[in-house]
Amino acid sequence: MKFSIARLCGGKALMAVSVDIMDIDMEAAAKRIEEEGLPIQTKDDQMIVYQWNGMETTLYRPGKVMFYPLEDKAECIRFATEILEKYQ
Protein backbone atom coordinates (compact mmCIF):
# COMPACT_ATOMS: atom_id res chain seq x y z
CA MET A 1 0.00 0.00 0.00
CA LYS A 2 1.09 3.54 -0.66
CA PHE A 3 0.14 6.53 1.45
CA SER A 4 0.48 10.25 1.72
CA ILE A 5 0.94 11.46 5.29
CA ALA A 6 -0.63 14.55 6.87
CA ARG A 7 0.48 16.00 10.20
CA LEU A 8 -2.47 17.25 12.29
CA CYS A 9 -3.27 18.65 15.75
CA GLY A 10 -0.16 20.79 16.03
CA GLY A 11 2.05 17.88 15.03
CA LYS A 12 0.72 15.48 17.67
CA ALA A 13 -1.31 13.36 15.24
CA LEU A 14 -0.61 11.77 11.88
CA MET A 15 -3.06 10.71 9.19
CA ALA A 16 -2.20 8.12 6.56
CA VAL A 17 -4.19 8.62 3.36
CA SER A 18 -4.23 5.64 1.01
CA VAL A 19 -3.45 6.59 -2.57
CA ASP A 20 -5.64 3.65 -3.65
CA ILE A 21 -9.37 4.27 -3.85
CA MET A 22 -11.05 2.34 -1.05
CA ASP A 23 -14.58 1.97 0.24
CA ILE A 24 -14.38 0.28 3.62
CA ASP A 25 -17.52 -1.44 4.89
CA MET A 26 -17.77 0.48 8.16
CA GLU A 27 -20.39 -1.82 9.67
CA ALA A 28 -18.21 -4.90 9.11
CA ALA A 29 -15.10 -3.04 10.33
CA ALA A 30 -16.87 -1.93 13.54
CA LYS A 31 -18.01 -5.49 14.18
CA ARG A 32 -14.47 -6.81 13.76
CA ILE A 33 -13.03 -4.06 16.00
CA GLU A 34 -15.56 -4.96 18.70
CA GLU A 35 -14.79 -8.68 18.32
CA GLU A 36 -11.11 -7.85 18.95
CA GLY A 37 -12.15 -6.26 22.25
CA LEU A 38 -11.12 -2.75 21.22
CA PRO A 39 -13.26 0.03 22.73
CA ILE A 40 -15.13 2.08 20.13
CA GLN A 41 -15.71 5.68 21.19
CA THR A 42 -17.94 6.70 18.30
CA LYS A 43 -18.96 5.38 14.91
CA ASP A 44 -21.11 6.31 11.95
CA ASP A 45 -21.22 5.44 8.27
CA GLN A 46 -18.08 7.50 7.51
CA MET A 47 -15.71 6.87 10.44
CA ILE A 48 -14.95 4.79 13.52
CA VAL A 49 -13.03 6.24 16.48
CA TYR A 50 -11.53 3.61 18.76
CA GLN A 51 -8.61 2.90 21.06
CA TRP A 52 -5.83 0.85 19.48
CA ASN A 53 -2.25 0.35 20.61
CA GLY A 54 -2.57 3.12 23.22
CA MET A 55 -3.76 5.69 20.67
CA GLU A 56 -7.01 7.24 19.60
CA THR A 57 -7.39 5.78 16.14
CA THR A 58 -9.87 6.98 13.54
CA LEU A 59 -10.66 4.81 10.53
CA TYR A 60 -12.38 6.59 7.62
CA ARG A 61 -14.44 4.95 4.86
CA PRO A 62 -12.17 6.07 1.96
CA GLY A 63 -9.04 4.47 3.48
CA LYS A 64 -7.68 7.17 5.76
CA VAL A 65 -6.41 6.34 9.25
CA MET A 66 -5.55 8.96 11.89
CA PHE A 67 -3.47 8.21 14.99
CA TYR A 68 -3.28 10.45 18.07
CA PRO A 69 -0.76 10.83 19.56
CA LEU A 70 1.79 9.74 16.97
CA GLU A 71 4.71 11.64 15.45
CA ASP A 72 6.70 8.93 13.63
CA LYS A 73 5.78 8.78 9.93
CA ALA A 74 7.22 5.29 9.39
CA GLU A 75 5.13 3.92 12.26
CA CYS A 76 2.07 5.69 10.86
CA ILE A 77 2.50 3.89 7.53
CA ARG A 78 3.14 0.55 9.23
CA PHE A 79 0.12 0.91 11.52
CA ALA A 80 -2.18 2.10 8.71
CA THR A 81 -1.15 -0.81 6.50
CA GLU A 82 -1.87 -3.26 9.32
CA ILE A 83 -5.30 -1.75 9.97
CA LEU A 84 -6.39 -1.37 6.35
CA GLU A 85 -5.33 -4.92 5.48
CA LYS A 86 -7.64 -6.15 8.28
CA TYR A 87 -10.69 -4.04 7.53
CA GLN A 88 -10.78 -3.47 3.79
Image (cartoon, helix red, strand yellow):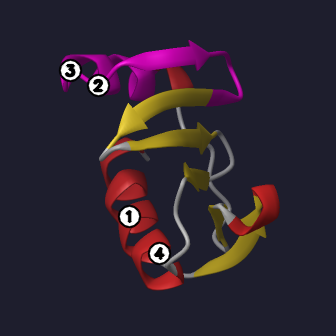
First in residue order: circle 4 vs circle 2:
2
Residue 88, image x and y in percent? 44, 47
- Helix or strand or loop: what does disc 1 sit on? helix
Q: Is residue 87 above or below residue 10?
A: above
Q: CA distance from mark 1 to mark 3?
A: 18 Å
Q: Is residue 7 above or below residue 40?
A: below
Kindly identify which numbered label has been placed on residue 77.
Answer: 4
Residue 24, image x and y in percent? 55, 40
Q: Amino acid at mark 1?
A: Phe
Residue 81, image x and y in percent? 40, 67
Residue lying at 56% horizontally and 41% vertically, measured from the top left: 59
Kindly identify which numbered label has been placed on residue 79.
Answer: 1
Location of residue 32 by image quarter: top left
Q: CA distance from mark 3 to mark 4?
A: 23 Å
Q: Amino acid at mark 3?
A: Gly
Q: CA distance from mark 1 to mark 2?
A: 15 Å
First in residue order: circle 1 vs circle 3:
3
**Residue 62 placement, left or right of 49:** right
First in residue order: circle 1 vs circle 2:
2
Kindly identify which numbered label has been placed on residue 37.
Answer: 3
C-beta proximity under 8 Å, tags 4 and 2: no
Location of residue 3 by image quarter: bottom right
The answer to if 33 sits in the magenta stretch is: yes
Q: CA distance from mark 4 to mark 1?
A: 6 Å
Q: Amino acid at mark 2?
A: Leu
Other residues around mark 2 within 10 Å, as few (<14) / some (14–19) / many (≥20): some
- Helix or strand or loop: what does disc 3 sit on? loop
Q: Amino acid at mark 4?
A: Ile
**Residue 55 placement, left or right of 2:** left
Residue on which the image places disc 2: 38
